[in-house]
Amino acid sequence: MHHVTSRLVALLAASLLVVGGLALDTRSTTPRASASGAHIEIANFAYSPARLVVTAGERVTVTNTDNVDHTVTAADGSFATRDLAKGQSMSFFAPRRPGVYGYYCAIHQFMQAVLVVR
């Protein structure tokens, strides 16, 4: 029972981080892709950055630095990675349609973040 309660608390906390991130002023606080492309790092069961702004169709590279497998899986199915083991990377292309795309880890569903496509 304690495990279920802990998981629910973690899921609620992650959801609040994602929802709270949607209200941020993106002019100065939202990480943007660099000239070499966008990067998401998975560490300590979290995505960094938790909110990333990219251009439509931009390549996004995901690197897992945790000791367990993780994925990046769009809630709407528009992008996904395979299971990534420690040290593995994979790229995908951001959706061509501007919008806010929530994503999560298909293995650890409490892990959530947002990709903003402009």
Image (spheres, rainbow, N blue to C red):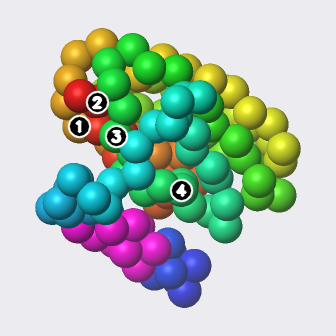
Q: Which residue is mark 4?
A: 48
Along the horizontal axis of the image, is 101 left or right of 87?
left
The residue located at (32%, 19%) in the rendering is: 56
In x, y percent, where is residue 37? 54, 29
Q: CA distance from mark 1 to mark 2?
A: 6 Å
Q: Which residue is mark 2?
A: 117
For the C terminus, the quadrant is top left
The residue located at (20%, 62%) in the rendering is: 24
SS at circle 3: strand
Q: CA distance from mark 4 to mark 1?
A: 16 Å
In x, y percent, where is residue 44? 67, 67
Question: Hey, what amino acid is under mark 2?
Answer: Val
Q: Nearer the viewer, residue 7 or 74?
A: 74
Residue 95 at least partly seen: no
- The answer to which of marks 4 and 3 sits earlier in the sequence is 4
Q: CA distance from mark 1 to mark 3?
A: 9 Å
Residue 50 at least partly seen: yes
The residue located at (51%, 37%) in the rendering is: 34
Relative to 6, say whether 71 is above or below: above
Q: Which residue is mark 1?
A: 100
The residue located at (72%, 47%) in the rendering is: 64
Which mark lies nearer to you, 1 or 3?
A: 3
Q: Residues within 10 Å of mark 2 (few under 14, many from 20)?
A: some
- Figure quadrant of residue 36: top right
Q: Which residue is mark 3?
A: 53
Marks 1,2: beta carbons within 8 A: yes
Question: Hey, what amino acid is under mark 3?
Answer: Val
Q: CA distance from mark 4 to mark 3?
A: 12 Å
Q: Which region is colored magenta?
A: 9-20
